[in-house]
Image (cartoon, rainbow, N blue to C red):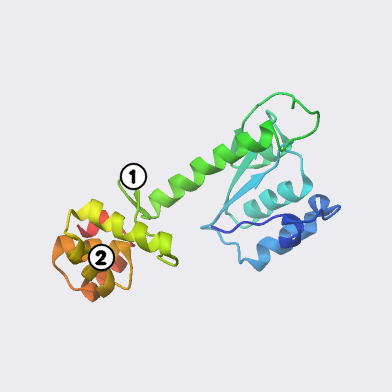
């Protein structure tokens, strides 16, 4: 998943005036990412009429990629152009025009659902656990240990040995414990199964 915002990364911290009206920039941004037919573009606009977002949706169509509009107005311009329109109608904002309030919150919930489902479909989970954790700090090292122990029920020493042999890869360590395979063999099996721990087990 790649996030793209009108105005680029600077727009995350500073107002980039006029960026949301720059249709050509949307096309350039998607082109730079190599947008292809097997990709999905999700255009997010509270009003559903932001030119940058509509241009991105149209470019997705031109490249035969699936397009989704997430807007807070029914029958929005973006929704009419997209393959799938998700219209979250929240009504007027308490502070008129301040779409970071109801609209932004509602859209965040929709995006949470979309990204969670994408992670499940991409085999990043096992049951209700995030098993594709990269243990890059102390908190995540502890989480990786807990995940492996919870899924396997193995004693602490076995869990730690499996994680060490698996370079901290949770899915690999679980497969090592539950199948008896070596870390290298477990990793190969996971690769062959497109990362699906369930398929390997």
- Helix or strand or loop: what does disc 2 sit on? helix
| Crowd class of label 1 (few under 14; some 14 to 19; many from 20; radius 10 Å) | few
The quadrant in which residue 98 appears is top right
Q: Earlier in the sequence, mark 1 or mark 2?
A: 1
Residue 50 in picture, x, y percent from top left: 77, 44
Q: Tell me the number on the disc at residue 56.
A: none
Cα separation, mark 1 vs mark 2, equals 18 Å
From where the camera sits, is residue 193 visible? no
**Does residue 46 lie above or below 127 as drawn?**
above
**Does residue 113 lie above or below 164 as drawn?**
above
Q: Are marks 1 and 2 in contact (CB under 8 Å)?
A: no
Residue that carries the numbered disc 2 in the rendered image? 173
The quadrant in which residue 13 appears is bottom right
From where the camera sits, is residue 91 visible? yes
The single residue placed furthest to the left in the displayed view is: 180
Residue 148 in picture, x, y percent from top left: 26, 58
Q: Residue at x 27, y 68 (%)?
A: 163
Pick whichever, 59 or 190, lies toward us.
190
Q: Residue at x 70, y 23 (%)?
A: 91
- Would residue 147 appear left or right of 21 to someone viewing this image? left
Q: Tell me the number on the disc at residue 128.
A: 1
Image quadrant in which the C terminus is located? bottom left
**Does residue 91 lie above or below 182 as drawn?**
above
Pick whichever, 165 or 2, lies toward us.
165
The quadrant in which residue 138 appears is bottom left
- Helix or strand or loop: what does disc 1 sit on? loop
Residue 175 in picture, x, y percent from top left: 22, 63
């Amino acid at each position: 998943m790649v996030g793209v915002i009108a105005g680029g990364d600077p727009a995350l911290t500073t107002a980039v005036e006029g960026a949301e009206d720059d249709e050509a920039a949307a096309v350039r941004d998607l082109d730079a990412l190599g947008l292809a037919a097997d990709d999905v573009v999700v255009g997010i606009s509270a009003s559903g009429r932001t030119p940058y977002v509509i241009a991105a949706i149209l470019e997705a169509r031109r490249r035969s990629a699936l397009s989704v509009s997430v807007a807070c107005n029914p029958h929005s311009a973006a929704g009419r152009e997209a393959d799938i329109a998700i219209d979250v109608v929240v009504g007027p904002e308490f502070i008129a025009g301040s779409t970071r309030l109801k609209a932004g919150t509602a859209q965040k919930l929709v995006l949470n659902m979309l990204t969670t489902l994408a992670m499940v479909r991409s085999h990043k989970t096992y049951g209700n656990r995030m098993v594709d954790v990269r243990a890059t700090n102390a908190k995540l090292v502890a989480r990786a240990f807990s995940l492996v122990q919870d899924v396997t029920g193995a004693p602490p020493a076995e869990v730690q040995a499996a994680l060490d042999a698996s370079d901290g890869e949770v899915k690999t360590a679980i497969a090592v414990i539950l199948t008896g395979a070596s870390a290298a063999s477990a990793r190969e099996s996971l690769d062959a199964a497109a990362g699906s721990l369930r398929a390997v087990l």
